[in-house]
Image (cartoon, rainbow, N blue to C red):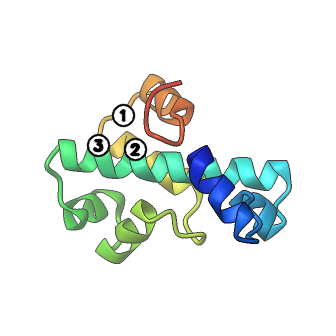
Amino acid sequence: MDKRKQRQLERAGWQVGTAAEFLGLSDAEATLVELKLRLSSALRRRRLARKVSQQELAKRLGSSQSRVAKMEAADPTVSLDLLMRGLLVLGATARDLARALQRTADGVAA
């Protein structure tokens, strides 16, 4: 959030904080959530770039299309292992995974 907007909200009586603060997440929990978000975003980008449907990716993973949709939505029931397997099935290398994990919130490599 930009600083101007934050100041306006605070002047209006709102408290501004992070999602982790609101949810009471520990640093480790917040980092885990961020990693899942980065991997799910990378999975969707790679799948679309490879012109692979969710159905096709599901078939390659031995899973269902709805599970792939959950993977791309960073659903809490999806494991990091499954997200990484999905990326690897789409041809990602260990270096690609490392790059995906280094991305900042705005999607730019750190």
Residue under the image location 25 percent in, 64 percent down = 54
- Number of labels in the image equals 3
Residue in the image at 53% along x and 69% along y: 75
Of residue 13 and residue 109, the one placed in the foreground of this image is 13
Pointers 3 and 2 in contact (CB under 8 A)? Answer: yes
Amino acid carrying mark 3 in the image: Arg
Earlier along the polypeptide chain: callout 1 or callout 3?
3
| Residue at the extreme left of the image, as rendered | 51
Q: Amino acid at mark 2?
A: Ala
Disc 2 secondary structure class: helix
The first of marks 2 and 1 along the sequence is 2
Q: Which mark is drawn over residue 46?
A: 3
Disc 1 to disc 3, C-alpha distance: 8 Å
Determine whether label 1 and label 3 are within 8 Å by CB.
yes
**Is residue 33 visible from the viewing direction of this image?**
no
Q: Residue at x 27, y 58 (%)?
A: 57
The residue at the point 84 percent across, 66 percent down is 24
Callout 3: few (<14), some (14-19), or many (20+) C-alpha neighbours within 10 Å?
some
Q: Secondary structure at mark 3?
A: helix
Task: Name the residue beneath numbered marker 2.
Answer: 42
Q: Which residue is mark 1?
A: 92
Q: Is residue 8 left or right of residue 52?
A: right
Q: Using a 10 Å C-alpha cutoff, classify the residue at mark 2 as few (fewer than 14 neighbours), some (14 to 19) or many (20 or more).
A: many
